Amino acid sequence: MSHSTTRLALDAVLTQTTGRHGGAPGVVAMATDRQGNFYEGAAGTRELGQDRPMTTDSVFAIFSTTKALTGVCAMQLVEEGRLRLDDPAGKYLPEIDELQVLEGFDDAGQPRTRPPKRPITINDLMLHTSGLCYEFFSADDLKYRTARGIPTVVACNFDSIRTVLLHEPGAAWTYGVNIDWLGRIVEQLRGQRLGAVMAERIFGPLDMKDIGFGLTESMRQRRVTIHDRAADGKLTPLPELALPDPPSMDMGGHGLYATVGEYMKFIRMILNDGAGPHGRVLQTETVEAMSRDGLAAMGLSAGAWTTSIPSLSNSGEFFAGTPKGWAYTWMTNRERTPSGRPANALMWAGLANCFYWIDRASGIGGYWATQILPFQDAAAYPGFVEFETAIYHHR
C-alpha cells in the first residue's frame, strides 16, 4: 500500500473524528516505525469557539501516559542494582507502610481499616496489585478520601496518594496511584525531583524538549484546552482547568505535559529495544522484561473499570472480550485485538482521552491525543480504534 494512500486514510479518520456532529474538538495523531514517524496529523481546534487550529506541535496534558516514563526511571535503577522488584517499597519510602486495608465503613460513614498481611513490594506498584486505586474508579476510595479529608490526585501533592488499600497486596489488579508512589521511590534513590531524573535519563538521550511536569512559556502558548462532555453530549471548553504549575510533587502517574511528537520519540526507543539517538536508555533485556505480562503467573488479569465520578470517566474497557494482562507499566493484550494489534503488544491511555500503543513485534506504534473529559469519550476513543485499525489495514 502506498504511503500516500495510508496518509489519505488516516487523514480521513482525523477529519471525521473532528468534523462530525458531536465529534472531538481537535486531535493530533502520529504513527512511527523503528526509523521515524510515517504519519503526523492534526485536525480541528485547540479550543471550541476560538480560532486556534490544532497543530502537530500542540501541547497536551498526557495524564496516565506519564506512567511508562516513570516505569523506565525505576527499571534504570533495577539495571544499576539499586532497586529490586521484590523489595518491600517501605525499604525506600517508610510512609507506604502506614497504608491500611479497608474493611468497610461504620454507621457514621467512618472507615474501618486494618494493616495488610504483607508489605507492598516494588512489583506490586509496577503491576497495580498493591490494592491502591483512584477516587474516580472506586466509590470506596472516594468515600474514604472524603471521610479523611484526603485531596484529589489532580492536586499533585503527596497527601493525595496516601489513601487506602481496597484489598491485600497481590490479591487483584486494581488500577490506581501506584506509579506516583514509584516516582517518589525514584526521587529518594536519585536525590532529585522526578522531572529532573527524566530530563537527564530519558529526555536528554531521546532529544525530547517539549515535555515536562511544568509548562515553558512556549508550551503554554500551545496548550490544548480540556473540554467537558455533558451527559447530553454537549462540549464545553474549560480553559481554567489545568494541573498545578509548578506542581508541589512531580506525579509519576499523571503529571506530564507534552507534544505528541515528543512522546513518539519515547515509543520509538521502546521499539528499538531501549536505544535512542544519543545513547541507550535501557538494556534490551530490560525492555523485554518490561513488556512481559506480570499478572498471568499470579492468575490475574486486567480489565474493565467502573466510574465513581462520571464527570471524569465513563465506565469501560479496552477491547472487551480480548483477555488482557499488565506489564511494567502498560496493558498488554493476550490475544490479537479487533484493530489488528498482535498479541503481547503494549498500550495505555490518559484521562483526557489520550491513547497509545507499542507493537514491538511489527515495529510500529502510535499516539492519539485529544483533551476531553470524561475518559473513554464517545468520539475520541472510537477515533483512536479507527486510526489504529487503518494503520494495520494499510500496512
Image: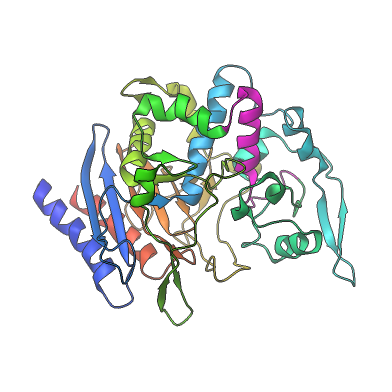
Residue that sits furthest to the top in the current view: 80
* Residue 112, image quadrant: bottom right
Location of residue 121 in the rendering, given as x and y in whole percent from the top left corner: 71, 35
- Residue at horizontal 84%, vertical 58%? 103
Side of 165 where 304 appears, left or right: left
Front-lying residue, 295 or 182: 182
Q: Quadrant of residue 15?
A: bottom left
* Residue for point 41% across, 40% down: 211
Q: Foreground: 297 or 364?
A: 364
- Does the stretch in magenta take in 158? no
Visible in this render: residue 1? no
Q: How many marks?
A: 0
| Residue 225 x %, y % | 40, 61
Foreground pick, 51 / 41 = 51
Q: x, y (%) of residue 235?
A: 40, 74
Measured along the vertical axis of the image, is residue 172 above or below residue 140?
A: above
Where is residue 101 shown, x and y percent of the image?
Answer: 81, 51
